[in-house]
Amino acid sequence: MKRKHPKLTRNLWIAVWLLVAVIQAWDWLREKPATPQPPPDGFFVELRHARLVDDPGNDGDSFKIAHDGGVHVLRLYFVDCPEKRRYALVEGRLKDQAGYFGGLSMPQILSVGAEAKALMEKLLGGQDFTVQTRWERVYDSERSYAVVVFKDGEDLAMKLVKAGLCRIHTKGTMMPDGQQEFDFESRLRELEREAKAARRGAWGTSRRAPPKPKT
């Protein structure tokens, strides 16, 4: 039986270890997407030329975007759009959302959620837009709170409020232009009153009839 030459075996192992080292070095040096890091407190990061990514989880106030080779899931500050579908985990939230608009039925509030998603897609789909974010996480999820800015000076939250397709109900923030949280929320309340008076969106939906008293 022919024995392996010890020097040949040693050289083979050295070659294997060198190959592993080269692969590890290449993996470490190659370009990788940067993990978003929170900026200093009070400062926003501007994401220009962001684009909407079609995703089943998108709705009026929460959606996926692509920017600079990375993908992020955003959640709007200040506003909460109705859910677009019904399941056990959102049952209580749907009831609260229906009550906010004066007592809509479950099919009605789900329809408003679908309208909010459609408006978001209309405003963001097929075009670039600018996002302002501090990468502040929403609870334990992968979503980050953000502001979506348009050329007309309004943001997506304002447009949803004006359309009557959301409630003013979630975390607020000082705005990227320095506007204080209270002042911006007051502006949203003013827009909401206008939408309600004009019966836009959910404010124009016929309310369900109250239950008849038992005799």
Image (cartoon, rainbow, N blue to C red):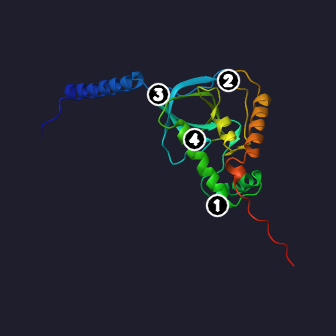
188 w.r.t. 91: above or below: above
Residue marked by disc 2: 176
Q: Nearer the viewer, residue 166 or 29?
A: 166
Q: In the image, residue 30 lies at what x, y percent?
A: 39, 23
Of badges 2 and 3, the one in the foreground is: 2
- Using the numbered discs, state the Cα–Cα distance from disc 1 to disc 4 in whole angstroms: 20 Å
Residue 78 horizontal side relative to residue 72, left or right: right
**Is the C terminus in the top left, top right, bottom left or bottom right quadrant?**
bottom right
Q: Earlier in the sequence, mark 2 or mark 3?
A: 3
**Residue identified by numbered label 4:** 120
Q: Name the residue furthest right.
A: 215
Q: Nearer the viewer, mark 3 or mark 4?
A: 4
The span from disc 2 to disc 3 (Cα, nearest Å) is: 25 Å
Q: Answer yes or no: do the residues labelled 1 and 4 have beta carbons within 8 Å?
A: no
Q: Amino acid at mark 4?
A: Met
- Answer few, some or many: residues within 10 Å of disc 3's Cα (few below 14, many 20 plus, some between 14 and 19): few
The circle on residue 107 is: 1
Residue at x 53%, y 40% (from the top left corner): 122
Q: Is residue 162 left or right of residue 24?
A: right
Residue 159 coordinates in the image, percent (x, y): 65, 37
Q: Earlier in the sequence, mark 1 or mark 2?
A: 1
Identify the image quadrant of the N terminus.
top left
Residue 10 location (% of width, % of height): 25, 26
